[in-house]
Image (cartoon, rainbow, N blue to C red):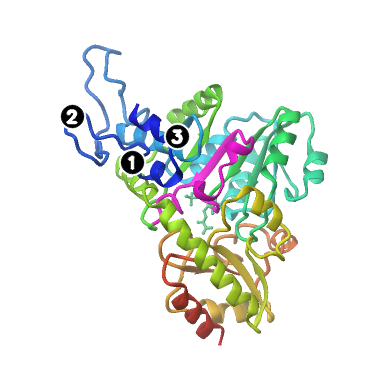
Amino acid sequence: MATENFRLKKQGTQYVHAGAEPDPSTGAIMTPIFQTSTFVQDAPGVNKGFEYARSQNPTRTKLEEALAIIENGNYGLAFSSGVAATDAVIKLLNPGDEVIAAADMYGGTYRLFTKVFERFGIKFIYVDTTNTAAVENAITGKTKLIWVETPTNPMMNITDIAAMAGIAKKAKAWLCVDNTFASPYLQNPLNLGADIVMHSSTKYLSGHSDVIQGALVMNNKELRDQLYFIQKSCGAVPGPFDCFLVLRGIKTLHVRMRQHCENGRQVAAFLHAHPKVDKVFWCGLESNPGYEIAKKQMKDFGGMMSFTLKDDSQEAALKVLTSTRVFSLAESLGGVESLINHPATMTHASIPREERLKTGLTDGLIRLSLGIEDPEDLIADLNQALA
Ligand code: P1T
């Protein structure tokens, strides 16, 4: 009940206290790690709310409460990875159902859709979701889900969530928003009419590059029950220690996000002015086509960005990618440390070249996940790598 009251508070207070009541048996201020697979019952079916840890675990329950609070939803569900959370959403569907999704999204999501679920008779229609009319035109009587990532990975395209919610409602389809790049600090899709919010908790929610995990948050009880049934039946649940780590990460989300955003601002300005840089993809630049919508639906613009060099070749990009000293060359994002990545050969290698070129994901594109280091050091590092 104490957790419930924190819904009324501001974000920072919510993040520190969500899902964190003192343990009733000991007073421990931090949620204990219930490292157990089963729970002793008084008689068959007579228990303390926990039976078997695939179905429920107290550490996971606290995290799921916290996830609901920080996304301003009624229910949260935690999964063993971001793709496991996405997998659960697609398992709501039946053969013959259609999904509208953008081709510009995390390569692993594209791979799951095209290489796994198409085999089960689910049809994915890829459209530019920044174009509301194109989405409307792609709706058919079989459309059951609109899948949106905003900002997108890695092109930082912005989709109007409220407009998508309107289209989904009219079509009697669900709208699911992958909110990984924004984090709940910057954007709350349920407030804008989405039915489900998905997160790779691996990223900003945990914030320290030390856990793989995913999340879904929703308002509708029936939808929650269907997704809980899938979570329990398919079994892609996170372990209690990983739940503890994400709960801990959430406590500092607001503080970290402020620095990620400030670093985003400073690094984008630096890259924008650099003579060797051609395009900078960051939704906080007024030149970004999604800027106005980002301003409307996000609190700030975040610490993810991509850029191309005037020499947009893979060779030129590789020189930069292997010359940084503060930025580490690695997949993933959203941690306290800055990362540099080559989407074409790393995170988005599973998207066919001709498909990714259509979205602007060239062989020379470089993606940055700005950590929370001092911006002067990040800029100096990029400056020497570009030289
Ligand atoms: O890695 P996992 O926790 O399973 O999350 C998948 C995922 C889903 N959605 C978005 C927007 C993502 O960026 C990711 C994972 N992305 C990377 C690993 C990456 O470097 O882009």
Label 1 residue near ligand 1, CB within 8 Å: no
Question: For the residue labelled by badge 2, is the local secondary structure a helix, a strand or a loop?
Answer: loop
Horizontal and vertical percent position of residue 263: 50, 67
Tell me the quarter of the image containing the C terminus. bottom right
Task: Report the label total.
Answer: 3
Q: Which mark is residue 25?
A: 2
Horizontal and vertical percent position of residue 8: 45, 34
Residue lying farthest front?
9
Q: Look at the picture and state if 292 lies above or below 112.
A: below
Q: Residues within 10 Å of mark 1 (few under 14, many from 20)?
A: many
Horizontal and vertical percent position of residue 91: 57, 32
Answer with mark 3 or mark 1, whichever residue precedes in sequence: 3
Q: Which mark is residue 8?
A: 3
Answer with mark 2 or mark 3, whichever residue precedes in sequence: 3
Q: Amino acid at mark 3?
A: Leu
Q: Which mark is residue 239?
A: 1
Front in this rendered view, residue 297 or 148: 297
Q: Is residue 120 left or right of residue 259?
A: right
Residue lying farthest bottom?
387
Q: Can residue 323 be seen here?
A: no
Magenta segment boundaries in residue numbering: 181-207
Numbered disc in front, either 2 or 3:
3
Cα separation, mark 2 vs mark 3, equals 27 Å
Q: Residue at x 35, y 40 (%)?
A: 17
Q: Amino acid at mark 2?
A: Ser
